[in-house]
Image: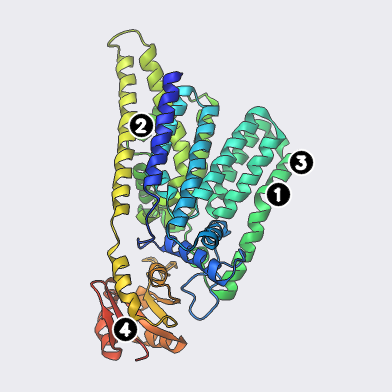
Amino acid sequence: MRVRRTIFIALFAAAVLLRVADTFRPLDRASWRESDLGSIARNFTREGMNPLYPRIDWRGTGPGYAEMELPLYPWTIAVAYKAFGIHDETGRIISMLLSLGVLALFWFLARDILEPDEAVAAFAFFAFNPLIFEISTAVQPESLTILAYLATAYFFARWMRTDRLSDLLAAAAFTSLSILAKATSAHIGLLIAVVWLRKEGVCAVKNWRTYAFACIALAPGILWYIHAKYLWLTYGNSLGVSNEHHWIGPDFFTNSYFILGILLNEIEWVWAGIGVIVALVGVILARRERAASFSLIWLASVFVFLIVAARTTADDWANYYHVFAVAPASLLIGIGAGKGIALFGDLKAKFSTRKVLAALIVLASVAAFVFNLRSIRGLFLQHRKHEPAFAESQQIEPYLRRDGLILVSGGACVDKDGYALAYNASYMFYWLDRKGFNICSDRQTVAAVEGFRSLGAQYFVAQKSELAHAKGFEPEVASRFPTVIETDEFIVFDLHP
């Protein structure tokens, strides 16, 4: 027990140190999501702290109210901005502090439902998973979401064991917070429904606690997303909710891209490759245990979400949507590793086949852990590199009038299948601290630029790689508007010379 406790403390301390070391860096990556959250926090500070009306920078001439999850996370950053001034690292510090709660909650859950060795192995895999590490310092609401998401699972699992009303109400409250923080976490309702029905059968639908739970868990989220939809319908701005088509279609069954994309994201970012084998061993050896069935049902509920939203979750850039699978996967890998350790220690025959298999399970567990460490190292080094576009934005900024609206190259309006995409690229707006418009890379014409010019755009901050998507567009724009400044990747045109 003392050795186990020492290992856990060492793992927890190492995980905390890694996160602290990764925290103090600016928003210098071309991350649409980080830049959006950073700009919303900054706009709360400058334009009013009403959390019901989050504002983005790519607002054109409107007020910028945008459809999104409840902006509790950027609003909290804005509160810190009010107290300490605007610093890019503030959002990362808040995410890092939330991530410590995430680590603690997963440990409490694993300790409650797994055997001691299994719990330590599960924690090791979870704490050093690259997705969990990435969201730990990202200026995104995922740290808050996963904190509430794990709290839901923890208190619900406790209620299954204790039947205490306080645990059930806590699970309901954290379900509500998780959905408000990120609507995609609503799939945890499938875990709750299946496990509850297994516990009480059809009697669950006659129990007042069921309806109280549903009301507490769902009502706040429904009210918020109705309001968020109103913002979209009124102002036309959305952070990828109504302005992008995420959902499965008939082509899911004819195009292997979707299922292969989901599986590749899972294997690389969630399971560390060989971790799948360790989990399978755990499922086989612990198939009658409550922890294994709980984890499998949880994982199945995540896969329902991943498949329903396959048009997004299959893309390689969307790996962070798979973060919901890390906790149940870690529990299953912990079960497999723990069973391997137990078998290896219990068998007396020196070279028995079962002892060799047990050793292989332990080695596979270690290999998966090492794979995760390599992935984290890669992310850590990547975070140390400055985005070239960020440095170029610092060259561009002095050439732009402070009050001049900008037109910035965005992504494509539709994908290759003709479905809508959220094309608004926010990072240049954040870096330049300007407001304005985005132009779709697949709808670039001089007439379109003239249209934005008539709406008040002063400058066109054009990204060369996006200009290349429209043949002949760059020389046509250059012949029509004078160049303000050119860098390696950007050309700035003056639309009102």
- The quarter of the displayed image where residue 456 is located: bottom left
The reply to whether callout 2 and callout 4 are in contact (CB within 8 Å) is no
List x then y, in percent, for residue 324.
48, 45
Residue on which the image places disc 4: 493
Cα separation, mark 2 vs mark 4, equals 55 Å
Q: Amino acid at mark 1?
A: Cys
Which residue is depicted at the point 30% across and 62% down?
387
Cα separation, mark 1 vs mark 4, equals 54 Å
Relative horizontal placement of residue 429, taking residue 241 as reference (left or right): left
Which residue is depicted at the point 42% across and 69% down?
430
Q: Amino acid at mark 4?
A: Phe
List x then y, in percent, for residue 432.
39, 72
Which residue is depicted at the point 54% across and 41% down?
150
Relative horizontal placement of residue 216, taking residue 301 as reference (left or right): right
Q: Can you say whether 377 is above or below 311 in the image?
A: above
Q: Residues within 10 Å of mark 1 (few under 14, many from 20)?
A: some
Of residues 195 and 97, which is closer to you in this image? 97
Q: Residues within 10 Å of mark 4 (few under 14, many from 20)?
A: many
Q: Which mark is residue 215?
A: 1
Cα separation, mark 3 vs mark 2, equals 42 Å
Q: Earlier in the sequence, mark 2 or mark 1?
A: 1
Residue on which the image places disc 3: 208
**SS label for mark 2:** helix
